[in-house]
Amino acid sequence: MKAKDDAEADYNEGLALLNMLRDQCKKQAFTFAQERLQKSKDAAAIKADKISEVATAYADTAKFPAAPAVGALCNYPKGNEDPAAKRPDCGEDNCCGAAQRFLADGTKLSIETCQKPETTVYTYWPALPENALVAPTSETWRFQCISAAGRLAASVAAALAAGYLSA
């Protein structure tokens, strides 16, 4: 009987030790999981702050000024079916022009902006990708005035009309 009692005592002692070690392991695993969760939350907060910072700074850099300032958009209003719709005025010292870039597949990208008549290049700021951590770099596109032709045609028409009326 003594052997049986000793074996039962050893078993109970081993079981108590096993339960204690299992509880310690659970506590350590829970603590480790909580630390990983907190690190993950901290990293996500830092990333969200960086995304917001990049988006704010890029929005200021890539913002189009209001017409007639240099850099303002001067394209025809979208969705306007009215044939009498006009481009925004670029003012006396500026011209409305097209900045263009051709892609490798032959697609032509174009943006119409107000610029000085002597301008030949335009700095294009591509769209900011969603959740960007780094702002894209600017691209240099060729630029050519398109409103000067309209002004020239109007002045020629006015000269012809004046000549016709004086004859």
Image (tube, rainbow, N blue to C red):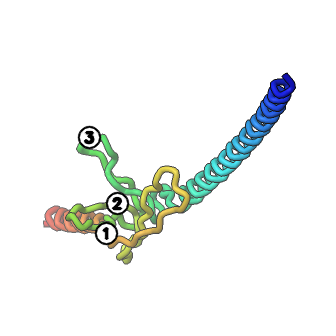
- Which type of secondary structure does the marked residue at label 1 adopt? strand
The type of residue carrying mark 3 is Asp
Kind of residue sitting beneath label 1: Cys
Q: Residue at x 58, y 57 (%)?
A: 54
100 or 147: nearer the viewer: 100
Residue under numbered circle 1: 145
The answer to whether mark 2 and mark 3 are in CB contact below 8 A is no
- Left or right of 65? Residue 12 is right
Residue at the far top in the pictured view: 1
Residue at mark 2: 112
- Alpha carbon separation for disc pair 2 and 1: 9 Å
Can you tell which of label 2 and label 1 is closer to the viewer? 2
Callout 3: SS: loop
Q: Give the mark nearer the N terminus: 2 vs 1.
A: 2
Badge 3 crowding class, 10 Å Cα cut-off, few under 14, some 14 to 19, many 20 or more, is few
The image shows residue 107, relative to residue 28, as above or below, that is below
**Is 146 located above or below residue 89 in the figure?**
below
**Above/below status of 159 relative to 52:** below
- Residue at x-position 36% and y-position 66%: 95
Q: Is residue 143 visible?
A: yes
Q: Earlier in the sequence, mark 2 or mark 3?
A: 3
**Residue 24 sits in which quadrant?**
top right
Q: Is residue 13 above or below residue 99?
A: above
Of the two numbered discs 2 and 3 in the rendering, the one whose residue sits closer to the viewer: 2
Residue type pointed to by label 2: Glu
Question: Residue 127 location in percent, x, y?
Answer: 43, 56
User: Which one is earlier in the sequence, the residue at label 3 or at label 1?
Assistant: 3
Please indicate whether residue 49 sits to the left or right of residue 78 in the image.
right
- Residue 92 visible (yes or no): no
Disc 3 target residue: 82
Are the residues flagged by discs 2 and 1 in contact, CB closer than 8 Å? no
